[in-house]
Image: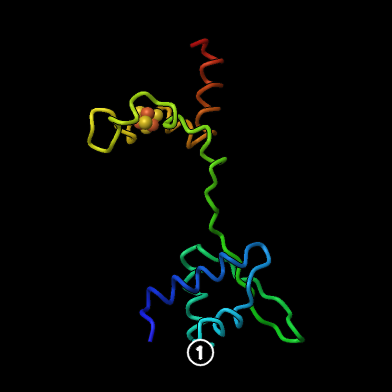
């Protein structure tokens, strides 16, 4: 019998691998070799955690659920303009260090473009 965490990891991998097409809840539990009850329990748990969206769909004349991953894949493009990549302090930057990502304004502004825009607008209004 597979360990609980291993089963959850395999289940989530199936949903992620299904991509935008999603996967029928019944296909997931069949591929995992678990009961429909266990499969439903996993799907509900993932939904509660915000990892998966369950959509009610009509499949072969029966209402069922389809699972869609809400996880966003990290790509190189998505971090290409991260200030850490070109930062001269990168090798000395760590939590608890003299330079720390926890208090880095550059990193904070990069992670929160709305904050960066808000501060830029504020600066433009006050002339600072
Ligand atoms: S968190 Fe800030 S200081 Fe640290 S490496 Fe990134 S840009 Fe540099």
Furthest-right residue in this view: 61
Picture residue at 63% right of the left edge, 63% below the top:
19
Determine whether, in the image, residue 31 is placed left or right of residue 101. Answer: right
Do we see residue 32 in this rendering? yes
Q: Quadrant of ligand 1?
A: top left
Q: Nearer the viewer, residue 100 or 58?
A: 100
Determine whether, in the image, residue 94 is placed left or right of residue 88. Answer: left
Vertical side of 76 occupied by 47: above or below: below
Q: Nearer the viewer, residue 80 or 65?
A: 80
Picture residue at 63% right of the left edge, 73% below the top:
23
Residue density around tag 1, few if under 14, some if 14–19, many if 20 or more, within 10 Å = few
Picture residue at 56% right of the left edge, 15% below the top:
124
Determine whether, in the image, residue 44 is placed left or right of residue 99. Answer: right
Quarter occupied by residue 108: top left
User: Which of the colour schemes (rainbow, by chain, secondary structure, one colour) is used?
Assistant: rainbow
**Image coordinates for residue 86, horizontal then vertical, percent:** 44, 27
- Residue matched to label 1: 35
Name the secondary structure under disc 1.
loop
Furthest-top residue in this view: 127
Q: Nearer the viewer, residue 123 or 3?
A: 3
**Image coordinates for residue 12, horizontal then vertical, percent:** 50, 69
């Amino acid at each position: 019998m597979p360990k609980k965490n291993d089963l959850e990891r395999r289940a989530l991998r199936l949903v992620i691998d299904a991509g935008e097409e999603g996967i029928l809840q019944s296909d997931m539990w069949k591929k995992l070799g678990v009961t429909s009850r266990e499969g439903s329990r996993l799907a509900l748990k993932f939904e509660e955690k915000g990892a998966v969206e369950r959509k009610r769909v009509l499949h072969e004349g029966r209402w069922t659920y389809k699972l869609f991953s809400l996880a966003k894949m990290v790509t190189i493009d998505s971090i290409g303009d991260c200030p850490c990549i070109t930062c001269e302090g990168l090798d000395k930057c760590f939590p608890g260090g003299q330079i720390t990502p926890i208090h880095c304004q550059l990193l904070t502004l990069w992670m929160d473009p709305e904050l960066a825009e808000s501060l830029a607008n504020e600066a433009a209004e006050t002339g600072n």
